[in-house]
Amino acid sequence: MAGQEKFKISIILLVLVIANFLIWQTIMSVSHYSELDFLNVGQGDATLLKLFNSGTILIDAGPDRSILNGLGKSFSLFDSELDILILSHANLDHYGGFFDILERYQPRVFVYNGFDGQSATFNNLLQSLKERGVIIFKMAAGDKIKSGQDVLEILSPGPQFSFKDVNDASLVFTLEVNNFTTLFLGDISFKALNNIIADWHSDIVKISHHGSKTGTNKEILDLIQAKIALIGVGKENRFNHPAQEVVALLKQSGMEIFRTDEDGNIRIIFGPQLKLVRNY
């Protein structure tokens, strides 16, 4: 019996040592800066914002449960809460993964542009959000989300605007973190962007519509003047995104291009300087 007791004690001590190691590893790995994780979800968009000493925001969720794999690589052992979900627009490649998010996480708030479209699938998503007690906000140009010193400001659509194209109804917004500006363009076309009065200058830009030639032109890129371009796109997708013309324009503008089909998950750390990690 004495031998069995010693064995049990040894196992307990080993478990405590491992647990202590994991806890300290998690503590030491926590970034002291806010982060943007641009997630590889195939042919779709998903971005996780982890705001230092504040909250977490998920912008779009890709087409399917691939979002769970991305989040699994982004969250630490004890960091798995999602405070706010933001949907740029009601296309399945941007909201399909929210169904799996609701099964795994308990978000508090869901933000979208208020354009419900005609999709029964999207209506099912709204119903699922309501059943789980998630607060639903409709946001438009001029609205802001503030988290400490960080500010997310909606540029489009305007409250009275109506769009025939669901892509042009995309929430377009800027995120100000640690004096760096990130511009999110959803799937909006450059023709619709021309109707928006805004200061487009940004450090980082989430390129519109997965690099489609309808979402980007030289005039828009000249206004943005970003250093970094992010493209969410699936390998060998049937749309041939990103368009070669767009890739060429981005290179001509001097932007460093990061795309999920080639670079996997992409992490941007908002420190004194921007730090990027590919395929983490």
Image: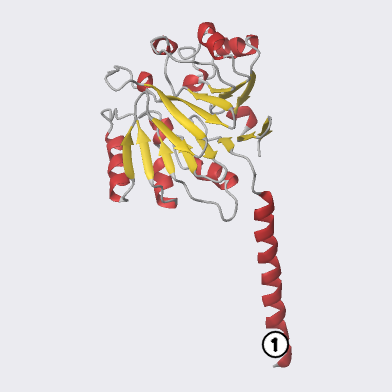
The image position of residue 163, as x and y in percent, is 30, 17
Relative horizontal placement of residue 87, taking residue 201 as reference (left or right): left
Q: Name the residue: 41% across, 47% down.
A: 107
Outermost bottom residue: 1
Residues packed near mark 1 inside 10 Å, few (<14), some (14 to 19) or many (20 plus)? few
Relative horizontal placement of residue 226, taking residue 119 as reference (left or right): right
Residue 155, quarter of the rendered image: top left
- Quarter containing the C terminus: top right
As shown in the figure, which amino acid type bears the numbered disc 1? Answer: Gln
Tally the numbered discs. 1
Q: Mark 1 — residue?
A: 4
The image position of residue 266, as x and y in percent, is 62, 33
Q: Name the residue: 58% across, 44% down.
A: 74
Q: Is residue 236 visible?
A: no
Q: Above or below — where is 160 with respect to 96? A: above
The image position of residue 96, as x and y in percent, is 40, 37
Residue 172, quarter of the rendered image: top left
